[in-house]
Structures are given as structure tokens and as C-alpha cells.
Amino acid sequence: MSQLLDNVVGELSKLPGVGRRTALRLALHILREDIEDVDQLAGAIYQFRRDIKRCSKCNNLSDTDICPICSSERRDRTTICVVEQIADLISIENTGQYSGLYHVLGGVISPMLGITPSELKIDLLIKSIAENSVKEVILALPTTIEGETTQFYITRRIENSGAQISAISRGIGFGDEIEYADPLTVAHAISHRKKL
Amino acid sequence: MSQLLDNVVGELSKLPGVGRRTALRLALHILREDIEDVDQLAGAIYQFRRDIKRCSKCNNLSDTDICPICSSERRDRTTICVVEQIADLISIENTGQYSGLYHVLGGVISPMLGITPSELKIDLLIKSIAENSVKEVILALPTTIEGETTQFYITRRIENSGAQISAISRGIGFGDEIEYADPLTVAHAISHRKKL
């Protein structure tokens, strides 16, 4: 078969969730597109990887040294929400309910994966808290062992910073059925019930 | 948000079956890859679109003027299998059961889509039949109205070429359940039953 086709199918099938069949379908789609459009696709992929920066204040993805959130005058600089990854930040931004700043750890503490606290830019977080006279740090971390460890570690590191520390609420999601929720979530939802 | 991220998510979500959520997941995957690997991915996409050729004999995808199948000495040059698209050729090749040549129409006759017989390289097919003294032309076309029309049209055009014309068999697929097969297929399978 064609080397060029083999090559593009091989490369595309390295993407998560893309098998060889899907990769072939994508390749044959690319074949039908205008060359300018394919150039834009390939260019966007490469430029993104080459030019994207990490915000020097919060570690968010950014085109510039400081990300649009950190440089915005409309954000509440006295609140910082700590998340594991960019996708979590995007998810929270999409709600439109949060107007504070973020801190993107870029991972959680994991002895298994060899991720130590020093890699999570926690010194940068402490610096941000001091610089902005932050009043509240919201921890929005995963409920895994690693997430809990990270939450515990960060709490210990910043407990004397003067900022209130909080964690996002846990419970049964809106639209989720209690019947199908995992036992841990149900137990938490019961024991942390709220007075009406 | 980041323009570079927006851009790559926008481009990726133009691919078939890729929504914005999947595109974001792919982008964040790309972010974690080595820049050389991303360069290879982007390069493979663009090079494929830019450099891929159509075989001047059978219209198959090819890196060279004549595709590996048409130039192979091990293929039976007296049999040509006519398919609508490259994906069909790949599917037949993958069986390892066919050793003849192909002719890729690149579509089927469709007044709705404005695809006329002249676009389907049928003259090229007729030329191949004459040049190779072809003994059999196998039509492996879709069972749509357009596919049937195309089959009828090609049959008319080549009926005096001296080649035997055949069509792939239709029926219930191996592993398919009769219960769930469409009525047309079941009807065909019954009326075209084979003696054992």
C-alpha cells in the first residue's frame, strides 16, 4: 500500500481513542479536504505544541507569559482555585460561576508515577497567595488517594498563610441517580447532608 | 482562553466524529507529547494530502504514478475488481483472497450530487480492459440506487469488451443474525439460495 497513507494512519492511530479503522477514515476525509484546510489543521497542531506557554503566575496554558485570566482586571484576585489539570480549569470556566484566579498543579502527588510535591509548583501557589493577599483557596482536586494526599499536603503548606482553605462539595450530581451512584459518594452525601 | 488552544480544538473538531470535547482531549494529549512526535503527526497529515497521487492506471491512492498493485508482477492482470472508493479496495485487500487488479471509480453516479459517468474514470476502465485482455470484471459496488445505476451503466459500457462481468454475492453476512438483517437482504438471500 501507499507509504504516505500508512504513515498518516500510523500517526493518527497513536492518538487516544483512535484505532487503525478510525485513523483510515480520518485519512480518507483529509484526502477530500482542500489542501489549504489540511495545511491549517497540520499547522494548528504543530503551532499549538510549539508555541503554547505556561502562565508564569498560575501555570495555565497561555499564548503569552501571563494568561488572560491572571491579567484580567475583572477577576477577583483574592480567591484562587487549585486544580489538577487544564481540563478541570476549562470545565470550571465553562460554568461561568467562578470569577477568581486559578492555580494549575499539572498533576497530583504520586509516588507510583514519581510525581513529587516539588513538581506541582506549590511554591508558585504560596507566592501568589502572598502577592495577592488571597482570602480564600478553593481546592478542586480529584477524590483519588493521590488527590487526597495532594489536598492534605497543600493544606499543611498553606495553613499559616492567613487564607481560608475550602474544598469543592462532594455528593450526588444533578441528574445522577442515587441508585447508580457509587457507595462512597452515597455514604458521603448522607453523612454530609445539609439542613433545609 | 488561549488562541492557540482554541485554534487546534477548532481544527480538530472539523474531523468527522470529533466533537469539541474530544478535540480538547486530543489537544491536551498533543501537549504532553514530545515536539518531534507532534511534528511527525502534523507532517504526516500535510505530506499525505500534498504528495499522495492517484494511480494513472486504476485511480488507487499511490505514492508513485503507478500504484504497487498495478505494478506488481504477482497480480492477475486479467481480472479487474471495480469499487466505489479506496476504503472498499483496502477492505478487499485485507482479506488476502483477491489477487487481481482494481479500478477505483471515486464515487457512484448521482444526479443529486452531480456526479456524472464522465467523472468516474470509466474510459480508463475500458482502456485497462483492452490493454490487459481482461477476462473478468467484478463489480463490487454499493447496493444503493446510485450503486445499482452505476452497475447498470458500467455493464452497458463494457458488455461488448469480451470480458465476463460479475458482481459480488449478496446475502446474510457470516456472524450476522437473520433476525436482525434488513428485509431486502433476507429476501435476496432466500430467492438466491444455493444448492448444497
Image: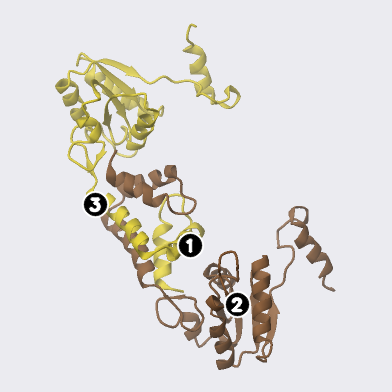
Chain colours: A yellow, B brown
Mark 3, residue position? A50
Q: Residues within 10 Å of mark 1 (few under 14, many from 20)?
A: many
In the displayed structure image, the side of residue B112 where residue A23 appears, left or right: left
Q: Is residue A68 above or below residue B67?
A: above
Residue at image mark 2? B82
Q: Chain of mark 1?
A: A
Q: Amino acid at mark 3?
A: Arg
The Cα atoms of the two marked residues, 3 and 2, are separated by 44 Å
**In the rendered structure, are the residues bearing label 3 and label 2 in contact, judged by CB atoms less than 8 Å apart?**
no
Disc 1 to disc 2, C-alpha distance:
20 Å
Indicate the amino acid at tag 2: Val
Viewer-nearest residue: A157 or A38: A38
Q: Earlier in the sequence, mark 1 or mark 3?
A: 1
What is the secondary structure assignment of the residue under circle 1?
A: helix
Q: Which x, y percent locates residue B112?
A: 59, 64
Q: Secondary structure at mark 3?
A: helix
Asked if the residue at tag 2 contacts the one at tag 1, i.e. Cβ–Cβ closer than 8 Å, the answer is no
Find disc 1 in the rendering and name its residue: A24
